[in-house]
Image (cartoon, rainbow, N blue to C red):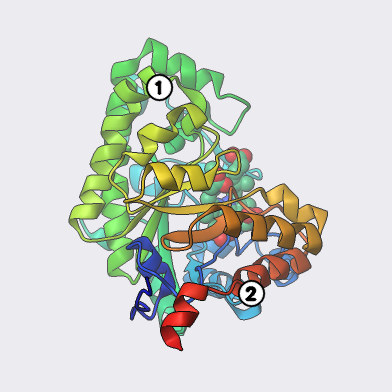
Amino acid sequence: MVRPLEHDPKPLLAALRGEPTARRPVWIMRQAGRYLPEYREFRKSHSFKALSGDAELAAEVTLMPLRRFELDAAIVFADIMSPMPALGIDFDFDPGPVVADPIRDRRGVERLRRPNPDPDAVAPEVMTALRITRGELPENVALLGFCGAPWTLAAYLVEGRGVKDFPTLRAFAAERPELLDALLSRLSDLMGRYLIAQAEAGADAVQIFDSWAGLLSLADWQKLIKPHLQSLLETVGAAGIPRIMFVQNAPHLIDAYAKLPAEAIATDWRMDLGQLQSRYPERAVQGNIDPAVLLAGPEATAERTRHLLDSVAPDGHIVNLGHGILPTTPVASVEALIEAVHGEVRLDIAAGRA
Ligand code: CP3
């Protein structure tokens, strides 16, 4: 059957509704970062904190990949830790987040600051960067806001920095589940307000990054993590904001994540995205090329991309990597990925146009 072309000028938003698009939308996680020569040039004179803390510079970096590639979304240049000053948390980057005084006891949770009720007060520089970026983007490019999921944020707040398997965090979850619950609840409330403020500042949709989702068993996830993630997603959904739920390295949790209230589920490269799509036809899917494949060069990248296009049905598929792009990625591989997506001929839609 011939299906009509969508009329939304932003293909990414149409895909989030599961509607057909002339071609699949594509963007790349961490697309503004370190693999771009013009970004590395900027970094010679500014630290990451200085860049993301200055709205003008952050907007400029956000737009860098859009100037080079035909991408369907811009993602605001910030970090999952950017809203943490609203809770009074002191941290730095080396190169990942390092928290000065990690949360390990009741005092740590109780000393968290009650955030200012003004919606723009959570990371005001991110709100300004979104407003500037919005004004510069063409009509067909979606602007994405984002945040860390409560558990992934708690991982840094409790462990103090990113370490393999986060043992201090897992011990905290086992020893002080009531404190973890209180911490996740504070984070979930703050992220709900933060995402709504980002939408008010111009974000068309938001992505929630649960990069460290897979650390606990399904049973512990259901008990400790899920209620807070569910309430965050419901808050954002009630405000009418389309949601992309990204989950990394958690094959044992994938069905639980796919059942959460979100328009799209985004996964890493370990999952078969086509199979996930068949199991949850009501969800859009995003992903999921292995970022390491791009290191193998443009030909390998184009081949993998075509394979992905063959194995995932086009409607409701947003092409992306399965995790952030790696610093040593050749720009030519990014070009090859986007060209392969643009080269796909949608016979059903072409027939509808003829
Ligand atoms: O990668 C993911 O899993 C996505 C979620 C996530 C982000 N930051 C989003 C982000 C996570 C887990 C972090 C923590 C973090 N922060 C790390 C990971 C490694 C660790 O040690 O735990 C790092 C290296 C940082 C610091 C950071 N964030 C730098 C130096 C940069 C600049 C660009 C770069 O990639 O080098 C960022 C930017 C950043 N972090 C973005 C996002 C969505 C910006 C958007 C973009 O680059 O497109």
Left or right side of 7 for 298: right
Instruction: Say which of 316 and 229 sits in front.
Output: 316
Q: Amino acid at mark 1?
A: Leu
Res 328 visible: no
Above or below residue 213? Residue 76 is below
- Asked where in the image residue 280 lies, by quadrant, the reply is top left
Numbered disc in front, either 1 or 2: 2
| Neighbours of disc 1 within 10 Å: few (<14), some (14-19), many (20+) | some
Q: Residue at x 55, y 34 (%)?
A: 249
Residue hosting label 1: 218
Q: Residue at x 27, y 68 (%)?
A: 200
According to the picture, the residue beneath numbered tag 2 turns out to be 343
| x and y, in percent, of residue 103 in the image | 42, 26
Give the vertical position of 322 relative to 170 (above or below). below
Task: Give the image location of residue 116, x and y in percent.
Answer: 24, 52
- Count of labels in the image: 2
In this rendered view, identify the residue nearer to me: 253 or 146.
253
Q: For the view shown, which residue lies furthest in the bottom direction? A: 354
Residue 230, quarter of picture: top left
Residue ranking furthest to the front: 1
Q: Position of residue 202 (x, y in %)?
A: 34, 72
For the N terminus, the image quarter is: bottom left
Q: Cα distance, mark 1 to mark 2?
A: 40 Å
The location of residue 283, given as percent across then percent down, is 35, 51
Quadrant for residue 43, please give it: bottom right
Q: Which element carries disc 2, helix, strand or loop?
A: loop
**What secondary structure is marked by label 1?**
helix
